[in-house]
Amino acid sequence: MADSLSLAGWSLVRRFRAAENPLALLDFPRVAREEFGFDAVELNSPFFTSLDGDYLDELSDHAAQVKVRLLGIAVDGMGDLASLDAVAREEAVQRHIPWLEAGARLDCEFVRVNLGGHNTTDPEAAVRAGIASFGALAQAAGERGVTLVIENHWGLSADPANMVRIITTVNDGRFGALLDFGNFPDDIRYDALARIAPYARTVHAKFKDFDANGAPLEIDVARCVTIVRGAGYVGNWGIEYEGKGDDHDGVVRSKQVLSHLLGLH
């Protein structure tokens, strides 16, 4: 295995949500290839118009035509997997299953789901609920030939100890972390990344804006790369640009910086 780059669809969120002529998910692989030179992308569930088999096959065909790999799906809004309400939690688990099936049909490597637990009244019970949810989903993912990943994506996952506990307790070969450079609180970011880096299956190389010399602001991307590589990670690094500037320029600058840091040319 070698290091490689991909483009996370969220980098172009303003295009997907544009009031006029929004970017269609079917066209995203072509844009990633022709505008930015990527050969792999991460998809986002809010940008799908359907999970119907014909639509998924069309998306797969569009990607194949431009030789772009559909690497994974980041799933949002399917319910709280750490809910203290057992019925609501089980409903959330079931709402995620079709996304695992979509990932398998698109030949994705991973499907990312969120832990949840925002504003929970009992964090310990919520973590236990999350363990049960991720255990069930990891088994379902394995049965479908995809890897399940949990991202440091706020809620209970803002504490790296919760992520490590869930991953090690579930202890399933088809389950690990999607490590995001940007989603831990600023005061613990780098120590927290070091805690979860040993469990990383894929990475969101998060970029905000850049200074006049093209260096990343807000996040020490070079330090993040050093931490992740220090844990022995080799694999995909998905660029996720979330700056306020032009998204074309932001993605191009992000790719230049990350390629240099990884020694990819």
Image (cartoon, rainbow, N blue to C red):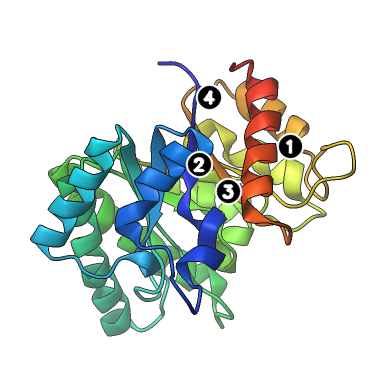
| Label 4, label 1: how far apart the Cα atoms are | 15 Å
Amino acid type, mark 4: Tyr
Q: Which of the two residues, 243 or 82, is positioned nearer the viewer here?
A: 243
Q: Earlier in the sequence, mark 4 or mark 1?
A: 1
Q: Amino acid at mark 1?
A: Val
Q: Residue at x 79, y 55 (%)?
A: 186
Between 118 and 259, the one nearer to me in the picture:
259
Identify the residue under disc 3. 240
The CA distance from mark 1 to mark 3 is 12 Å
Report the side of 36 relative to 132 (left or right): right
Q: Considering depth in this image, is 177 or 223 the residue closer to the camera?
A: 223
Residue 257: in sight, yes or no? yes
Please identify, in this view, whether the residue under mark 4 or under mark 2 is nearer the observer.
2
The residue tagged 2 is 35
Do residues under tags 3 and 4 come within 8 Å of each other at their CB atoms? no
Q: Give the quadrant of the N terminus.
A: top left
What residue would you read off at disc 4?
Answer: 233
- Of labels 3 and 2, earlier in sequence is 2
Q: What kind of element bears circle 1? A: helix
Name the residue tied to disc 1: 221
SS for tag 2? helix
Question: SS for tag 3?
Answer: strand
